Image (spheres, rainbow, N blue to C red):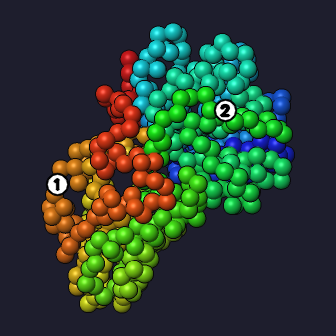
Amino acid sequence: MCGIVGVIGHKDASKLAYLGLCALQHRGEESSGIVSYDRKNTHSHKGMGLVGDVFNEETLKLLRGFMAVGHVRYSTTGSSISKNIQPFLVNHRKGHIAIAHNGNLTNTAELRQTLEEKGSIFQSSMDSEIIVHLLAKSTKSDSKARTIEALSQLQGAYSLVLMLDDVLIGVRDPYGFRPLCLGKFDGAYVLASESCALDLIRAEYIREIEPGEIVLIKKNSIESLKPFSQIKHTACIFEYIYFARPDSNIFGQNVYFTRKRLGYQLAIEYPVDCDIVMPIPDSGNYAAMGYSEKSGIPLETGLIRNHYIGRTFIQPSQEIRDFRVRVKLNAIKDVLKGKRVAVVEDSIVRGTTSRSRVRTLREAGAKEVHMLVSCPPLVSPCYYGIDFPTKKELIASKHTIDWIRNFIGLDSLKYLSLEGMLKAMPLAKDEFCTACYTGKYPTAIPKKFSKTQLEGRR
Ligand code: SF4
């Protein structure tokens, strides 16, 4: 996952891009970067870490120009190291290219091998760099034809913001796996992964970029192309379940209400005899609200998130069990003591984090703990830009629900059905990718795949 943003037609383009990245921070915490262009030169500033740590007033002043692209990264191809920070910027015989990419290509290995055999030299281990090479190698003279020629060779998931000389380009792959929307602020056009980035800068939301659409934006004009043959759209359903911010509209629809409807549906499918309903914060909050509303069981806050802690590197002593979980979430004993608790969780990946959280609830005095998960069991890895572990690390791929219940230490465990999840969605059920729940992938998948597949090669 990553967050991407592009701005054109504003004297403070990089400042707007910076604010957009602040709003998209949840999509990637590993590194941040902005590239700007002032009609003479490109300017770039990138670093490992959060947006607020990488940029300050001085660095933003140096990012001059009427145009900027920005990126926050959560690595899915290529390790979390400085050479893999985006936007990726190159100067070539015809001008410059900067790219910010969200998604994962599925024909990375083939494309990279072909390009290397023809003499391309790569600086990073990211699939995104391949797109830059394809654009730079194009023999077409104008930006429109170059973009179409390069993108027609890609397979898989890609939402892109590209700076091609003085043109800002927004792209969604023909399947439409990842979101990308368009807005306008003070005469400038803004592209962003989610609408919450537009809200922060008070930009007017115009629309979602459509699957398979290429939008070319110059200072005062905007052109839309749909050069690829139409195929069935498969938006990532996990964006609605977990990833996107609840105050965003993605794929043209609101995330908050969708999560509430997931909770509603859970209450219809699995009524539980409990004293209180509580979420695992923050991603379970809205499904828990929906569950409480539909079931009539009071909603309480049993765990409080510490918002000031980032990653925790220091474990004070082995005796302080579950330290990493407890430093982020602390139980309110007076809420939980003696209660039968229905806990709403957005998803279970390995199961180890859920186990620690449930232990915290029991230690705080909960009499019974029942877990309700607002999506079906995750059984297959994602090849389209979510860093799920391998199949064998996904707990539900090799164990029964009863085994998982016992492992986590629950009185009962219920997952929302596939039909129920699709029913709660704001788009038609055949508009989604659900491969991590079903194992049915909408594209051909790589024979061999690992996040570091382009590293350590001879
Ligand atoms: S496999 Fe799952 S996480 Fe990946 S794109 Fe499909 S729905 Fe989203």
- Left or right of 426? Residue 92 is right
In the figure, residue 247 lies in which quadrant? bottom right
Front one among 63 and 411: 411
- The type of residue carrying mark 2 is Leu
Residue 61 seen in this snapshot: no
Q: Residue at x 55, y 24 (%)?
A: 152
Label 2, label 1: how far apart the Cα atoms are: 47 Å
Residue 361, x across and y down, in percent: 29, 78
> How far from the left and from the top, in percent, is residue 227?
61, 28
Q: Does ligand 1 reach within 8 Å of label 1's beta carbon?
A: no
Query: Residue 399 has which mark?
Result: 1
Q: Residue at x 83, y 29 (%)?
A: 40
Q: Where, quadrant-wise, is the C terminus in this rendering? A: top left
- Specify the quadrant of the image occupied by residue 366: bottom left
Residue matched to label 2: 225
Dot 2 or dot 1: first in sequence order is 2
